Image: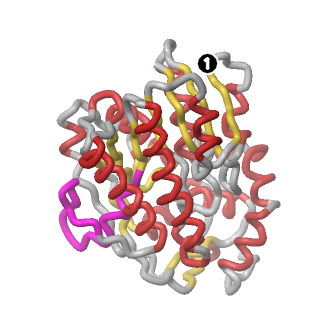
């Protein structure tokens, strides 16, 4: 099987590429990535000599770049390429519209033109918006509440429309909050872990009681693989960990794992505009196909903290570059010293 992975130098994409090549000896993967700030070739440096892996730099909004990456043909496209951080979507929504909506359109046209057998759109639980109680299954109405979530919902709707209109063999996976190695440190867990390693405070939005459903990146990647291999075109599948925790609970667990005093290191900052209070996914549809998360949350979180402690070579260059300017702007009111 020959697979084109878009956005394969990002967090989930790079873990997917590595896991699939480790799991499937007969697969080859072409990775198309624009290498924006969160696309890091170091995420896959261990695969540079693997003959089954090829990197192609390009933008999914560029039809010629997509066609060049497809080359003589692929059996499937898995689209991870996206602008993903809600905070950045609030300050620069246009970039999200371009990649998440126009880019998805370009890929769908390539699938149609090149007669590719499978297209999987990797999406998010945030398209459902705030879930006050219970959990959202795939029939739940889309009610995005941030520019990021709206752009992802727009991509999802294109996928479903192409299936109905053109018969495009397209599917959608919608994942919950994902954690693990190689996650760009603007996201909660790697941001807080790297701050605490450097003896810096952590910025908790509002009261910290926003609830997220946490999923280890390897379980997320296995869920995406399961949708790709066994899902029905024209359908969406939720991929959730079933580990609902408040942001404050996660914060205190990270403090405990790193031996830090909450009184000294927790800083409550002004809440994000339109911050969704709760997400929760019903994963019965994908579980019926045989998928289940395998990694215990407490164990996975502890192993993730250890990974960041042991791999400063990876995150220190990131935090000293573009990220530093972003952090100063985003958390201007946060004192740097605990």
Find residue 331 and report its horizontal and vertical position in percent.
Answer: 66, 79
| Residue 217 seen anywhere in this rendered image of the structure | no
Count of labels shown?
A: 1
For this rendering, which residue is in front, 46 or 157? Answer: 157
User: Quarter of the image containing the C terminus?
Assistant: bottom right
| Residue 249 seen anywhere in this rendered image of the structure | yes
- From which residue to which does the magenta span run? 123-142
- On whether residue 136 falls in the magenta region, the answer is yes
Residue, disc 1: 52
- On whether residue 228 falls in the magenta region, the answer is no
Who's the residue at 42% across and 47% down the image? 122
Relative horizontal placement of residue 192, taking residue 228 as reference (left or right)? right
Quadrant of residue 237 within the rendered picture: top left
Relative horizontal placement of residue 239, taking residue 76 as reference (left or right)? left
Specify the principal SS of the magenta part.
loop
Who's the residue at 64% across and 43% down the image? 33
Who's the residue at 71% across and 79% down the image? 329
Find residue 202 and report its horizontal and vertical position in percent.
Answer: 62, 71
SS class, disc 1: loop
Find residue 267 and report its horizontal and vertical position in percent.
Answer: 59, 79
């Amino acid at each position: 099987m020959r697979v084109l992975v878009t956005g394969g130098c990002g967090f989930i994409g790079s873990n997917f590429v590595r896991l699939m090549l480790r799991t499937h000896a007969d697969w080859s993967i072409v990775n198309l990535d624009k290498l924006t700030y969160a696309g890091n070739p170091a995420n896959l440096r261990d695969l540079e000599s693997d003959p089954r892996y090829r990197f192609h730099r390009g933008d999914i909004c560029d039809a010629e770049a997509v066609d060049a990456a497809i080359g003589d043909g692929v059996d499937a496209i898995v689209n991870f390429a996206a602008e993903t951080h809600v905070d950045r979507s609030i300050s620069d929504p246009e970039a999200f519209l371009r990649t998440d909506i126009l880019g998805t359109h370009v890929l769908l046209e390539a699938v149609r033109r090149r007669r590719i057998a499978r297209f999987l759109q990797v999406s998010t639980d945030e398209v459902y918006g705030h879930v006050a109680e219970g959990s959202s299954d795939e029939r739940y109405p889309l009610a995005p509440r941030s520019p990021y979530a709206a752009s992802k919902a727009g991509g999802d709707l294109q996928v479903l429309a192409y299936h109905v209109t053109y018969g495009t063999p397209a599917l959608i996976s919608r994942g919950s909050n994902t954690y693990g190695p190689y996650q760009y440190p603007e996201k909660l867990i790697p941001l807080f872990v790297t701050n605490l390693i450097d003896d810096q405070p952590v910025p908790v939005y509002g009261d910290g009681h926003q609830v997220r459903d946490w999923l280890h990146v390897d379980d997320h990647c296995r869920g995406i693989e399961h949708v790709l291999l066994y899902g029905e075109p024209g359908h969406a599948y939720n991929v959730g960990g079933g580990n609902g925790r408040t942001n404050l609970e996660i914060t205190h667990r990270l403090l405990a794992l790193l031996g830090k005093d909450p009184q000294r290191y927790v800083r409550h900052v002004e809440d994000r505009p339109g911050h969704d209070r709760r997400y929760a996914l019903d994963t019965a549809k994908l579980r019926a196909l045989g998928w289940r998360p395998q990694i215990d949350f407490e164990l996975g979180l502890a192993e993730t903290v250890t990974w960041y402690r042991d791999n400063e070579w990876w995150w220190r260059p990131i935090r000293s570059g573009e990220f530093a300017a972003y952090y100063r702007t985003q958390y201007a009111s946060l004192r740097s010293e605990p």
